[in-house]
Image (cartoon, rainbow, N blue to C red):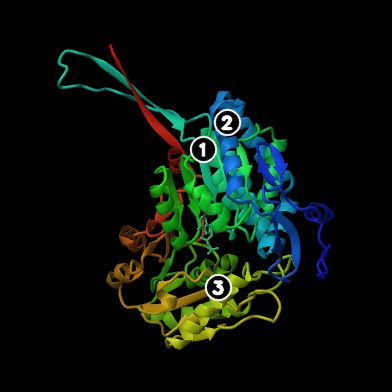
Amino acid sequence: TLESQYSISSKNDLYLSTPKKLLIDGEWQDSVSGGTFEVRNPATEEVIARVTDGQAADIDLAVKAARRAFESGPWARMTPSDRSKIIWKIADLLEENADQFAELEALDNGKPITVAKAADVALAVDLFRYMAGWATKINGDSISISVPYMPGEQFHTYTKKEPVGVVGQIIPWNFPLLMAAWKLGPALATGCTIVLKPAEETPLSAIRLGELMMEAGLPKGVVNIVTGFGETAGAPLAAHPDVDKIAFTGSTDIGRLIVKAAGETNLKKVTLELGGKSPNIILDDADLDLAIPGAASAIFFNHGQCCCAGSRLMVQESIFDKVVEGVAEFAQNIKVGNGLDAATQMGPLVSTDQFNRVSGFLDSGKQQGARAVTGGNRFGDTGYFVEPTVFVDTRSDMRIVQEEIFGPVVCAMPFKGIEDVAAAANGTDFGLAAGIWTRDVSKAHSVANVIRAGNVWINCYNIFDAALPFGGYKQSGWGREMGKEAIDLYTETKAVTIRL
Ligand code: ADP
């Protein structure tokens, strides 16, 4: 039980009271080494659960189970319609347990429980339903061909979309349940089998989801969940010779290691969803009653721990002061606190590492001459809280302008005319998302056209739907999550040609 002032539901009290195991071949198992590690609540720094420390030997067992399930288990013979029903059932069970999941996310990640329920859990439920629909609609084409070196002969060709096979999925801690759903949904819809490695900071909701997936009737070995650390569980998964694809979401630096591991082993397929430094552009004709709160939420949602956070606020000169003042006021009014409190709007950062990282950026910004109009410091003295921060007087060569901070820290910068926007907006190594705020339809589309990013939001920000592809240009990633694109990336195309 917790000593903090917030009582937790009896369901989670019970769930957290037993050490969490690995899901391998349909059984909850200890690791080969027998090791475990502690999981902490970032708001109180208290230990809330013990989780199994999966390592290379466990990854290997999980990959073998996934291979068996893929090659010879009931999953391989199941009809798309039966697969669809199981995925739909997972969504139903998740929805029935929405309160438990929202509370788990608040405890484990620190995010506000109200946000977890309205966004993380609701989007995860919807994702599974959307992907359940795809299971029965994965088809190839028929193609007419003419072969110049075989004159007079006729052929008929069709393509089939087949599951890519055993996939390794490595996910981050910022949306623990939702990232699991984004990864698992399309892999299940296409008929792949999976080894999922949740983030060591936030493994609790993925393990609970594993329980529900078994309850939904998923055959053993289809989804295996190995909790553990990046270097000791993630790296062996990325390097495993019998994994056909690795899907990774996390930092750009680790993304490079994943690609290297794939290249040095079996050239497994790789998809990556990496960092960002997304521009949020406000033109002088924008509706500021929308744009100011929009720009604030773009960076402060999930405490800035979003790969698509609108962390570079680019404002046209004439309205710069007004917008900065508005965003700073918004920041000052955010209620920071324990995620279990229904009134909380912003929780702590996820871990002591992230706290130190973000604090380092706050120091670096000040040292390089930027000015914090609001925030810039730690919030309180317990838990990994930092103040929502707005920096001005920034230059393009500053670390806070170029690098992903992954905290509630925005750099506001003025620009002269719309013709200056593209170069500045595209002036980082990333290309994940962008926001544009204007009343002028033509300007909106012109700017959207020149932005090199996978997602552009006009007069809105952080809009997600299971049908919308999400992912990045440049060093923000390879491939897309969600939508039809995700289905394509979990399939191989086979072209079958018949001589008539
Ligand atoms: P962050 O720095 O924000 O925690 P990471 O990219 O380090 O982001 O972590 C995202 C995921 O990648 C986590 O599940 C983590 O355990 C995993 N990971 C970290 N290092 C490695 C690695 N060397 N190989 C494979 N996975 C890793």
The picture places residue 497, in percent across and down from the top left corner, at 31, 20
Identify residue type, mark 3: Pro
Task: Give whichever of 92, 237 is nearer the camera.
Answer: 237
* Residue at the image position 48 percent from the left and 46 percent from the top: 246
Other residues around mark 3 within 10 Å, as few (<14) / some (14–19) / many (≥20): many
Q: Could you tell me if the residues under marks 1 and 3 are in contact, i.e. CB atoms within 8 Å?
A: no
Q: Nearer the viewer, residue 123 or 418?
A: 123
Query: Residue 253 at what x, y percent from top left?
Result: 44, 62
| Marks 2 & 3, CB-CB < 8 Å contact | no
Closest to the camera, between mark 2 and mark 3, is 2
Q: CA distance from mark 1 to mark 3?
A: 37 Å
Number of the front mark, 2 or 1: 2
Instruction: Answer with left or right where residue 24 lies relative to residue 154.
Output: right
Is residue 147 depicted above or below 112 in this figure?
above
| Cβ at disc 2 under 8 Å from ligand 1 | no
Residue found at x 58% / y 46%:
59
- The residue tagged 2 is 68
Which type of secondary structure does the marked residue at label 3 adopt? loop
From the image, tell me which residue sits under label 1: 166
Looking at the image, is mark 2 or mark 1 earlier in the sequence? 2
The picture places residue 244, in percent across and down from the top left corner, at 46, 39
From the viewer's side, name the closer residue of 113 and 73. Answer: 73
Q: Quadrant of residue 268?
A: top left
Residue 314 sits above or below residue 247 on the image? below
Q: Indicate the secondary structure of the residue bearing disc 2.
A: helix
* Left or right relative to 124: residue 441: left
Asked whether mark 1 and ligand 1 are closer than 8 Å, the reply comes as: no
Mark 1 and mark 3 lie on one chain; the one further toward the N terminus is 1
Residue 239 is marked as none
